Image (tube, rainbow, N blue to C red):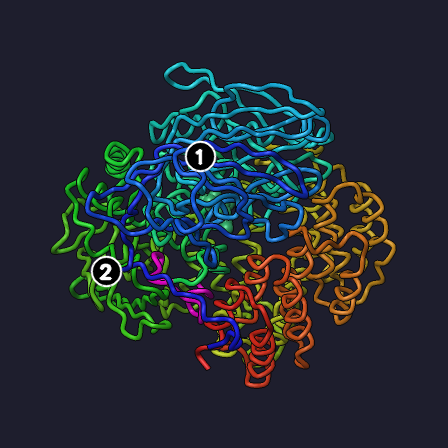
Amino acid sequence: MIAPAHSPAPPVIHREDYRPPRFVIDSVDLDIHLDPELTQVRARLHLRRQSEADDQPLRLCGEGLALLEIRQDGQPLPKDQYRLEEGVLLLLHPPRDFVLETLVQIRPIANTALSGLYFANGHFITQCEAEGFRRITYYLDRPDVLARFTATLHAEQCPYPVLLANGNRVAAGQEADGWHWVRWEDPFPKPCYLFALVAGDLGCVRDHFRTASGREVALEIYVEAHHLDACAQAMDALQRAMAWDERVYGREYDLDRYMIVATDTFNMGAMENKGLNIFNSKYVLARPETATDTDYQGIESVIAHEYFHNWTGNRVTLRDWFQLSLKEGLTVFRDQEFSADENSRGVQRIGDVRRLRAAQFPEDAGPLAHPVRPDAYIEINNFYTATVYEKGAEVVRMIHTVLGAAAFRQGMDLYFARHDGQAVTIEDFLAAMEGATGRDLAAFRLWYSQAGTPVVHAAGRYDPAQRRYSLTLRQETAPTPGQPEKRPLPIPVRMALFSPAGQAMPLRGQEEDEAGDRERILMLDTAEQTWNFTEVGEPPIPSLLRGFSAPVRLETGFGDAQRAFLASHDDDPFNRWEAMQGLALQALLAAIDQSHGAGVLPELLHGALAAVLSDAQMDPAYRAELLTLPSEDYVGEQMAVIDVEGIHCAREALRRAMGSAFGEQWAADYESLAFPYSRDGISSGRRRLRNLALAYLLASDASYLDRTRQQYQQADNMTDHLAAFSLLVHQPDADVSDILADFYQRWQQHPLVIDKWFAIQASAPRPDTLAKVQALLQHPAFDWRTPNRVRALLGSLGANATVFHAADGSGYAFLAAQIRHLDELNPQIAARLVTPLSRWQRYDAQRQGLMRQALEDLAGKANLSRDLGEVLEKSLKLA
Ligand code: 7MF
Ligand code: ZN
């Protein structure tokens, strides 16, 4: 056990141990006097025992609360009737049906963990998911206890004119000494993780939405007054998301008011609290001068994500935290589909798969691997992972693929009809999908319980005499911690066959229907299976896993000739991109293998690039995707032992070669793609392609430094300004101190832009980066209490392979030392920053030793948080 002897091992929570609550809470009445130093929370809970026969004590959760009063049905509770234990208030002889009233005191200003009620930048903010409500008052802090909430907030009028909570604003008034109060009533029973309050001096942007049934909903975005001009994208995205959920799922919003609050101090992206979403300001605020196209895109998808939770998460909520993917996987799937419908479906899919491969595949292959529905946890906050979110979304997507859109919608309708107002399980979701469609999804359940990414091997054989093509697919999944044996999963493989002339062939097979469709979904649900296609007149080129129809690694054994063919002929945008990536990947792996630095472009890659560069008809954003090399991390993922330096050198050399081989085309693109700023998809695609062109030009021709500086100075939008800034700061041996100072000077009033300033410096693949980051820790704008700032500096450093993995271990020791400090302030963020160290198995022996040493040093720390302790223990287990 990692924890020092004096602190007992934290308990492990098991999914199998779930028991329904002994008590329910019908109503909660909160009365909160807000003061940063000492806030008082009075809570009246109407509790009811579920079973007549039960006479067990009542255990309420509570953390860091000072109990001032406790009453039962109005009478002070004698001391021998209750006990306070670590994290628990125990009522020894509670009546069957009664009102419990507690008064507790908390200190929001000292809450640096940003869970529960905290005070930052002059505002009171709450974050209750997953288990933050117990830091506000004693409660049954579990998602299957649904109650009606009323909250009366009291605060000084002057610094806190705006007082918000969930639901409807039902009363307000003035009090003595300049205080005021507002009462909020939420008519929808909810679990306490959806409770929220906000208090502060905030301006408001108002608009409205008329629902399909004709109700007017007030839409309100609360931000600091100087940001009132930066809410247009968020408001527009919200209205589009509301319309989309009506159109695609028939789901209307259910309250008269929808509020969004933006804060600079937030642990995560955003939170779907009923009627009162709280957002990291990164996902609300945008102006062309301060936000990039990527930022605008992020706002659209996070606004949509939180809105979609109103049905998938809030109206139908979770029985227990093991079911987290029931709301998160499903809601990510919904926000991905929204963005695909609003923008370019192909580009959206490529981005989603990129993210899955960058975050989830490594998680599934490492010591923290867990199923989409985990079996056990120590700290639930550690399970808000790429597996639960992104792989969970892929599983929902596969169900959508095999059922078809119409049947999937019927399943969703039944899910809402059956479970509105309930706290349910993933099993209930699958049962609704089955109930509505008559389909059997029994085999699909394994996707929720089995961890690890399957590898699918494909082999094709063409028999010209029989005019037959046989495709054999074989699957295997490597063991993961606690799951040594793996079973075959049902894997939908969307596929087509192309004739050598580039036409998709009609597909005919003996057992399949004879319809002759040009695309088919093969269901691989055993270890190995063969499909025969008949009347195939020429040797076909297969296009497999189209649209990335399952979250697997596909090994085709294809050569570059097949990749090049698909790169020019495949009509599936994802697979065409995948073929291009494959060509580039093979060039990089070959160069690393022979350590020759990829100085020349392989002929087939050259040809494929030339074709894309000369295709002016193609959507610029998609063209940019086709011309972007696989990331260093993705290349590393394909290697048995990640060769950090080799990958970086090979990729840089290939970028140089691509720059010089097509210098004229890049230069022509760079000039012709210059348009006045506009905020539509075509324009942002042009900027993306144009900045990619500049990157290639600069990689191969140092004289473009001046042009880059010029763009930095003259850009009329943050996308172009930042692209140039980043290129300059990442130049291996340019002196850019003037640029760094200029950027800071210009943007110091804009925290979200200063985050980029920190992040880009910490991401520079330069030998002096670690020293620079060390110095930046002392910069007046660095702030340990602001997660965005900490992530910008330390998260970026951990993702900066050549610097973080410096052979002497300096990157590891540095990050570990910072995590040690951060764990005292914000355990959730500390635990997340460990991720790059947890991947030690993939590096050479020397680095493995140094990474493990850093982890062990951290594990020996006194007062380790549960969050960090759990991640360290699992990371070190596979020794
Ligand atoms: C889009 O899921 C996708 C994922 C929990 C906090 C937001 O709505 C959420 C919250 C974490 C990690 C990622 C996301 C969220 C959280 C998120 C946001 C937007 N229920 Br932790
Ligand atoms: Zn979510």
Q: Which mark is residue 44?
A: 1
Q: Which span is picked out in magenta?
A: 361-376
Crowd band around label 1 with a 10 angstrom C-alpha radius: few (<14), some (14–19), many (20+):
many
Give yes or no for residue 374 being in the magenta stretch: yes
Question: 677 or 192: nearer the eye?
Answer: 192
Q: Is residue 479 visible?
A: yes
Measuring 62% from the left and 33% from the top, which residue is drawn there?
199
Q: In what element is the residue under mark 1?
A: strand
Q: Secondary structure at mark 2?
A: strand
- Comes first in the chain, label 2 or label 1: 1
Q: Position of residue 371 (x, y in %)?
A: 35, 61
Provide residue 428's location: percent of width, then percent of height. 24, 45
Indicate the quadrant of ligand 2 in the picture.
Answer: top left
**Amino acid at the residue labelled 2:** Leu
- Residue sitting farthest toward the left: 511
Tell me if residue 336 is in the magenta stretch: no
- Of residue 56 and residue 373, the one placed in the foreground of this image is 56
Q: Is residue 296 depicted above or below 57 in this figure?
A: above
Q: Residue at x 37, y 68 (%)?
A: 555
The residue singled out by tag 2 in the image is: 524
Depth-wise, is mark 2 or mark 1 nearer the camera?
1
The amino acid marked with disc number 1 is Arg
Quadrant of res 368: bottom left
- The image position of residue 115, as x and y in percent, is 55, 49
The residue located at (57%, 30%) in the rendering is 153
Q: Are marks 2 and 1 in contact (CB under 8 Å)?
A: no
Give the quadrant of residue 776. Answer: bottom right
- Residue found at the far top of this picture: 214
Q: Left or right: where does residue 836 sit relative to residue 201?
A: left
In the picture, measured across the screen, residue 615 lies left or right of residue 332, that is right
